[in-house]
Image: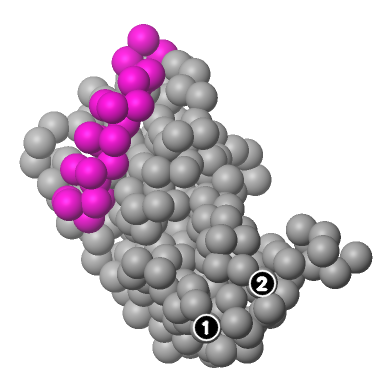
Amino acid sequence: MESGVAVKLFKIIEALGATGEPVGLAPLSARVGLTKSTVHRILSDLVGLGYVERVRPGVYTLTNKLQRVITGKDDQRLMNCAEPLLWELHAETDETVNLGVLSEDRVIYLKVIESAQPLRRVAEVNSTDPFYNTALGRAIVSQLPEEEREAIVDSAELVPRTDRSVTDKGKLREILAQAKQNGFASEQDESDLGVTCLGVPVYENNRVIAAISVSVPTVRMDQMRFEDIVGRLKKVADHLTEMLGTRAAV
């Protein structure tokens, strides 16, 4: 039993959790009584899954993903903090506003506030979309640590939704790099023809955990409106990030 992969994996997780701070590969291996090659291999898998972050070469720490999986409390806390801000953004833009989190390589919609206008794009709460052709997904994945981001891109199967959907991983990497630099992501006509979506990441403890987006019919989007919505999204996301860093857990 002691030689089982699951036992080794949980030994590593427990050791990382017990320290409460980043740990180097050598001291972690000594603590769990496993070879460095074994620990490195398991850590690489955990990094790819998003449960561990490599903060610098050879140094690792747990992310908050494990807690989210076990309790689900963080999603409720996120929604409680976000809801009044999302309604304000909805009132300001009169467009559909979305809050989403990443699950493996898909975005889960936690909150959707529909536009009252007849021409609109709406996703259902708890529905999912691939990360690669949504502004929500791109906003989140672009801000992940490089190793984790690459693991998600490498494993993704780029199935087009429209004739505008990105299907080349090299192009996807360019899009994610631009989103990382700009602090927001966009997609136009890639999930649905005639719809443009803009998304901005949300952070907790300096790690991206979610994104907020606004979906707009492309006919109602020009450069001035594009810049206005991005500015409003960044303001809301910054406010939500600040709330998550100071508000006690629900």
Determine which quarter of the picture holds residue 145. Answer: bottom left
Tag 2's secondary structure?
loop
Q: Nearer the viewer, residue 69 or 19?
A: 19
Q: Which residue is mark 2?
A: 34
Which quadrant is home to the C terminus? bottom right
Please provide percent x and percent y for residue 228: 15, 50
- Colour scheme employed for the rendering of this structure: one colour
Q: Which residues are magenta?
A: 162-184
Residue at left offset 44%, top offset 52%: 148
- Looking at the image, the residue that sits furthest to the left is 224
Q: Decide which of 196, 52 is in the foreground and name it.
A: 52
Q: Which residue in the structure is indicated by mark 1?
A: 27
In three-dimensional space, the C-alpha distance between marks 1 and 2, rounded to whole angstroms, equals 10 Å
Looking at the rendered structure, which numbered label has been put on residue 180?
A: none
How would you rate the neighbour count of disc 1 (Cα within 10 Å): few for under 14, some for 14-19, many for 20 or more? Answer: few
- Front-most of 245 and 61? 61
Judged left or right of residue 117, residue 232 is: left
Is any part of residue 52 visible from this angle? yes
Q: Residue at x 52, y 83 (%)?
A: 27
The answer to whether one can see residue 212 in this image is no
